[in-house]
Image (spheres, rainbow, N blue to C red):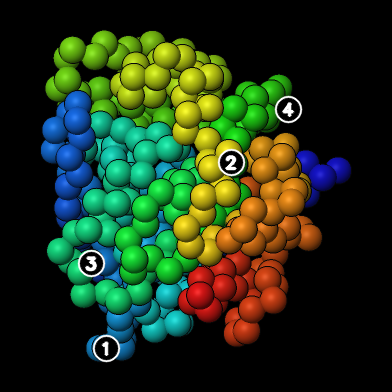
Amino acid sequence: MDHIEGFYWTIRARLTAPRELPSAATFATEVHDPLTGVVPLSGWLHRSDEATADTLLIILHGLGGSPDSRYVGAALAAAEAAHIDALRFGLRGSDGAAGDFYHAGLTADLEAVIAAPAIAPYRRIVVLGYSLGGHVALRYATESPDPRVIAVAAVSSPLDLGRGQKLIDRPGAWLYRRYLLDNLTTLWQDVHAQWQATHVALPDVERIKRVRTLREFDSLTVVPRFGFSDADDYYQSASVGPRLGSLAIPALLVAARQDALVPPGAIDPWVEPAPRNLDVRWARRGGHVGFMPNLDLGQPGRRGLESQTLAWLLRH
């Protein structure tokens, strides 16, 4: 019955999330890629009502998502209630304008955003990532994070990409997988139309439309684009699980054992026992990026995933 409850909380979160996100100032910067050169990045910077706000929340979307994904709205509301600024930006390719795309271990986009001139005034930065975005946040925290980044949080994020792929591609997850692949195919249409690095052969859209598994999609796109030898090489090289012992700053992982997309098998092997600097919180009830509205992580203030997670981040 766990998978049924997990499905309920997953769907409920999407149905109850804000349909329209608040307006904000446009944000733009670029990242320099060794293969494609300059890659544009874009997003929106939401200013709080505190003129002296010196803390910024950076929000990272999940695989197949974008800065406009509905779950981002709850994070923006939590930032507004905490009187801090928030930046939601798209990993390369998610906005259909970059002519490139991302993968789960690519931290260059986040690094470039933090280094952007518009972010220079902030004294403290915290990062909240959902699903793949959470994996990127954790991976960034194991590298050489900017000194202003005081903590990161990951929600429903796999720690072992290979295990995660197998779980997503299993027969029982076909509904989630189809939804995910449909979003990725839409992204690929925009990327392929603008792809300029002709010395890397990439499949056309019609071939991608015939993809039936996440592994197949990764093998056709991520592997040739980023120079991995095969999908297993990508999963092993990019997975943050083996790197968690190198976390340079405090990190939080929030997950649900009923999550059908990222179940315990994609997390447990790397958190028992939990590495130094990693705080793992298993929600009693929840799904993929969907939890009880009154979720309590033991933090002061409002209940709920984003409010409690942001309180944890700011406490550090």
What SS does tag 2 mark? helix
Instruction: Tell me: residue 218, above or below residue 135.
Output: above
Q: Is disc 3 in contact with disc 1, using a CB cutoff of under 8 Å?
A: no
Specify which label sits upstream in the sequence, 4 or 1. Answer: 1
The type of residue carrying mark 2 is: Gly
The type of residue carrying mark 1 is: Thr
Q: Residue at label 3?
A: 119
Q: Please tell me how crowded label 4 is: few (under 14), some (14-19), or many (20+) other residues with Cα within 10 Å.
A: few
Q: Residue at label 2?
A: 241
Q: Quadrant of residue 113?
A: bottom left
What SS does tag 1 mark? loop
State the image coordinates of residue 223 (x, y, percent, origin top left): 39, 19
Pair 1/2: label in front: 2
Cα distance in 3D space between marks 4 and 3:
43 Å
Cα distance in 3D space between marks 2 and 4:
25 Å
The type of residue carrying mark 4 is: Gly
Q: Residue at label 1?
A: 52
The type of residue carrying mark 3 is: Ile
What SS does tag 4 mark? helix
